[in-house]
Image (cartoon, grey):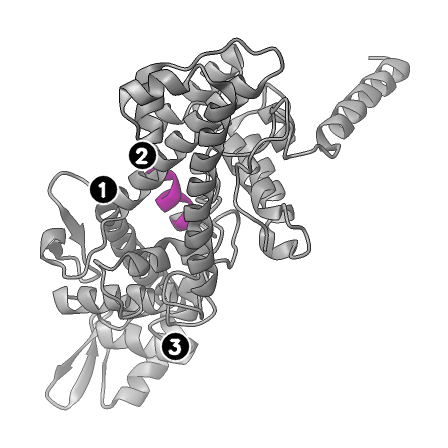
Amino acid sequence: ESPAAAAAAADVERIAREALEAEVDLLVEKDLYKILGVRRGAKTEELKKAYKKRSLKYHPDKNPNDPDAKDKFQRIAEAYSVLADDKKRLKYDKSGDMDLEDFDMDQFMNMWVGEMMEDGGMVDDMMKEVLPWRDEEEKMMQFMEANVTKQGKNWVCKLDGQSLSNQRLMLAHFEKKYQFECDEWGKDQLNTMKASFESFMKQLTGIGDSSGEFLLPDGTKADMSKVKGVPDIRSHFQGKIDKANEQEKVLEIYRKVSAEDSTFVPDTKELAKLLGLEEGVAEDLKTDTKRLLHRLKRKIDELNEEEDEEADLMEQMGGLGGLDGMGGLGGFGGPGGMAGKGGLGGLLGGMGGGMGGMAGMEGMLESMLGGMDPDDPEALMKLLGGMGGMPGMGGFGGLGGGAGGFSSPPPRGGRRSH
């Protein structure tokens, strides 16, 4: 390849890269590839990298002075949720449409738990705060205790049969000979804690195996149905999705009816269901454009008000901390969020502190819920408060909403700004 051709190719690549990185109006842009800042042929790793970069840039916590930050963050999450799924991406590429009716709850739960558990992710970060040992010396001491036996007055090493008269000499023997083995043992201990937590979270979110059992840190298994205080996360998520679908349908009818020179007439049964009307009332209403738009706007306002109340509750509970698009996990354990051991750290700390049985697991759940009643809606909101903006959900506020695409000034489709 000639220098001139190479230079031309480099210029083309630079121009394409600059086009992808160019600022777009996330509130009105409809092209999901532009929202995420990737080319149409982007591979999985490119999508993931772009999502993390943009979600970090537009995270509400990093843009406190931008009243639209939450909605922008939501659009990025929505774009990723579609493009990261092969079937949804194929459908989008063909039609340009996103359809919440196709929302896959299992896929979302797997994505949520997977991102939480990935190497170098949130749980790994939290592990550093809740290690079962305070320093390297204490780790070596625990490793030694797991690999020695007492024979009379002597300490005997199970690894090489070395017999010494006291614990201090045995510790020196281990420090000299088994540092590598100690480090590997430490990694195994953390992996065991992590595997137990992942097993528990999969059962909690309904994506575990059909046995209903999860792995405890000591290697035994426990029945999820016997753990007290388990919140019904799936039902709560499904309720949010159902509400999002309802909101999107109402907004779509509003868009079509309010369009200039519109001749659109909504389906009577669907209109009656969405607005809670008798079919006869809906039949009369659908042909009266002015009254219909007024009624649709009132319904949208009701849905927005419900979202605002939930958003206020989440913010009061400290659920707006952030980490790689997770929208934070402040809900795990209250206002302290991830900063201390009261939340997710406390949960993992319970594992590290010998949570070998059911009592330990129930204590872990108590830590997770901050002592709140799992049947109390506020407790569940506290638990889920920080999950807005997760891939696949597009955030809890304004799911399926957004104000783009109206031909005339529409009612608000997302949450209010604070």
Quadrant where the C terminus lies? bottom right
Q: Position of residue 401 (x, y in %)?
A: 50, 34
- Whole-number angstrom distance, CA of label 3 to CA of label 2: 49 Å
Q: Marks 3 and 2: which is nearer the front? A: 2
Q: In which quarter of the image is residue 192?
A: bottom left
Q: Mark 3 points at which residue?
A: 175
> For residue 408, which quarter of the picture?
top right
Q: How crowded is mark 3: few (under 14 residues within 10 Å), some or many (20 or more)?
A: some
- Report the predominant secondary structure element of the magenta stretch: helix
Residue 143: image x %, image y %? 29, 72
Report the magenta residues as a range: 110-116
**Circle 2 residues within 10 Å: few <14, some 14–19, many ≥20:** some
* Residue 300, above or below 285: below
Check whether the beta carbons of the residues at disc 3 and disc 2 lie within 8 A of each other. Answer: no
Nearest to viewer (mark 3 / mark 1): 1
Determine whether, in the image, residue 214 is placed left or right of residue 144.
Answer: left
**Which residue is at a point 13% across and 57% down the rendered structure image?**
220
Helix, strand or loop at disc 1? loop
Residue 113 included in the magenta stretch of the image: yes
Q: Which of marks 3 and 1 is nearer the N terminus?
A: 3
As drawn, the label of residue 206 is 1
Residue bearing the label numbered 2: 105
Question: Mark 1 belongs to which amino acid?
Answer: Gly
Q: Which is more toward the observer, 55 or 361?
A: 55
